[in-house]
Amino acid sequence: MDVQHIRRIAVVGAGTMGHGIALEFALAGYQVHLHSRTEASLDRALRNIRDNLDLLASLGVVTRQEAGSVPARLQTSADLEAAVADADVVIESVYEDLALKQQVFRQLDEMCPVRTILASNTSTLMPSKLASATRRPGKVLVAHYVNPPFLMPFVEIVPGAGTSDETVATMSELLKSMGKRPIVVRKEVPGFVASRLQEALLREALWLVENGVASPQDVDVAIKTSIGRRWAVAGVFEVLEIAGWDLLEAIASDLFPHLASSPAVPAVLSDKVRRGELGVKTGKGFYEWTPQSAEALKRRIAAALVEIERWST
């Protein structure tokens, strides 16, 4: 399918990622149909979209006129078939459960035109397992966004064993035309690229806290005021090219044996979940949260992302 022929996008799942992806496509000028199983979740998604449009306008990312044009291009429906029947591209963003996603892909395969590309926003599940629920493996892939999707330019495209080169190229060009900077993952591995990198850092951060080396707050300070600042403008390979790989080999030989490597979920994380200390959504995690402090954090992140994007372009 030629990118020029793509007109209609459907997003299945109206949660944090789903409504953000729908917002971005609508801002880019596409007709978007957002689906969720209940009208209540769709109403919540529309409120979040309005709030995010206000945020983008206040940060100067879009004009008030551009923000005001979005509702005319965005439809919602609790009827899956109505939402996807004429879609050129469908992006699934439901709960991260393989059986559920396979069920959705089976339905999409039956309801969508044969031309439709079926993409999943999964962060870990193999596209081949999703394609196996359809009769169109050549048109199935993963398009994994990072939150918030309307501010983060990164998307990783992950083809399955049966995904056609044409489908990969079409999805890549579609995303690039919207200002995204997609990468194509060369082979299926759990977690792909972004999630693996994040979880590797998280495992070490949790080990440091669990073993009393540093507080969660001090771990965050270490990341925000050192490596995090560099990684915002230069990747790990770029940064360490400056240091030199001979030095890094010496450091790695000394330090790698001491890094966290257990496959088990750290107890400090499991204990938090058992106590219901889930972070912002429950008002407590490793930090205490109020609605005001949570909103302030989200706005701080958004403003910084906008400035980084302006600086880097």
Image (cartoon, rainbow, N blue to C red):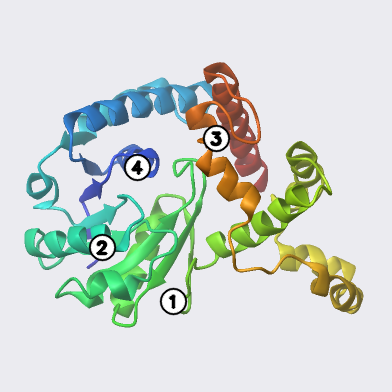
Q: Residue at x 25, y 73 (%)?
A: 131
Asked if the residue at tag 4 contacts the one at tag 1, i.e. Cβ–Cβ closer than 8 Å, the answer is no
User: Alpha carbon of mark 3 to alpha carbon of mark 1: how far?
Assistant: 33 Å
**210 vs 110: above or below:** above
Please state the horizontal and vertical placement of residue 63, each as a whole percent of the image.
44, 25
Q: Residues within 10 Å of mark 2 (few under 14, many from 20)?
A: few
Which residue was labeled with disc 4? 28
Q: Are marks 2 and 1 in contact (CB under 8 Å)?
A: no
Q: Which residue is mark 1?
A: 188
Identify the amino acid type marked 4: Ala
Left or right of 145? Residue 140 is left
Which disc, if any, is residue 99? 2
Q: Which mark is residue 277?
A: 3
Is tag 1's residue or tag 4's residue first in the polypeptide sequence? 4
- Amino acid carrying label 2: it is Ala
Sequence-earlier tag: 4 or 2: 4
